[in-house]
């Protein structure tokens, strides 16, 4: 499946063309938010702030345009490097646009579909090799994804990476 990432300046015409072509869209809402919050620590000059804020607003609008066009929409964060503590923020930001279940489905089933592994991760007789458990109800409180302390269990490739269940 053809896939386009970021797309903060996605417009209606392009979104419709992508949908007709069967392409997917993976927005990255988190990166601008984190850049704004970490600007000083990262050494970004004040003069980039208007552009970062513009990208932040446009990224949200791009998701709304993609939804209206009927695009397959995955989930990404565009965060790089060893510190990934803000990765869950993508789900919280996305939930504010198309609901908590929409955010969860985008990050799981839709991303698997985009990667071409959707048949490999579910079904009778299958075992979860990747799993994230959170403290709380993400459908009632989607903002919990943005708090790494609320993520209590992470299993990646069948290996427990984090277990703070106590």
Image: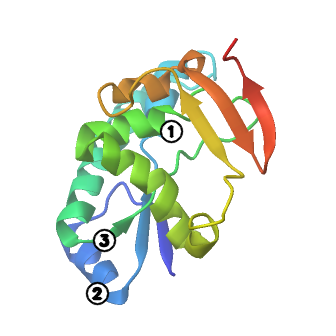
Mark on residue 31? 1
Residue 9, image quadrant: bottom left
Q: Is residue 153 above or below residue 113?
A: above
How crowded is the residue under tag 1: few (<14 C-alpha within 10 Å), some, or many (20+)? Answer: many
The residue singled out by tag 3 in the image is 71
Mark on residue 20? 2
Identify the element where label 2 is drawn: helix
Q: On the rendered image, what quadrant is the C terminus found in?
A: top right
Residue 26 position in % (x across, y down): 45, 60
The answer to which of 115 and 127 lies nearer the viewer is 127
The answer to which of 91 and 152 lies nearer the viewer is 152
The answer to which of 7 and 71 lies nearer the viewer is 71
How crowded is the residue under tag 2: few (<14 C-alpha within 10 Å), some, or many (20+)? Answer: few
Q: With 128 as the anchor, is 75 left or right in this view?
A: left
Q: Residue at x 43, y 39 (%)?
A: 91
Q: With 84 as the anchor, is 40 left or right in this view?
A: left
- CA distance for labels 2 and 3: 9 Å
Point out the tag, 1 or 3, that comes first from the N-terminus. Answer: 1
Q: With 16 as the anchor, is 1 left or right in this view?
A: right
Q: Residue at x 53, y 45 (%)?
A: 77
* Residue sticking out furthest to the right: 159
* Residue sticking out furthest to the front: 125
């Amino acid at each position: 499946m053809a896939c386009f990432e970021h797309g903060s300046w996605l417009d209606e015409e392009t979104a419709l063309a992508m949908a007709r072509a069967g392409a997917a869209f993976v927005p990255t809402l988190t990166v601008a938010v984190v850049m704004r919050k970490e600007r000083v620590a990262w050494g970004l000059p004040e003069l980039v702030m208007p552009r970062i804020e513009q990208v932040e607003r446009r990224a949200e609008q791009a998701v709304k345009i993609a939804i209206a066009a009927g695009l397959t929409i995955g989930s990404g964060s565009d965060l790089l490097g060893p510190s990934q503590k803000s990765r869950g923020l993508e789900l919280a930001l996305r939930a504010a646009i198309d609901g908590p279940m929409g955010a969860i489905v985008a990050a799981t089933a839709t991303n698997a579909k985009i990667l071409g592994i959707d048949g490999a991760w579910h079904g009778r007789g299958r075992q979860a090799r990747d799993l994230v458990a959170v403290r709380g109800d993400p459908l009632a409180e989607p903002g919990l994804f943005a708090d790494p302390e609320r993520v209590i269990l992470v299993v990646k490739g069948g290996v427990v990476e984090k277990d703070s269940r106590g």
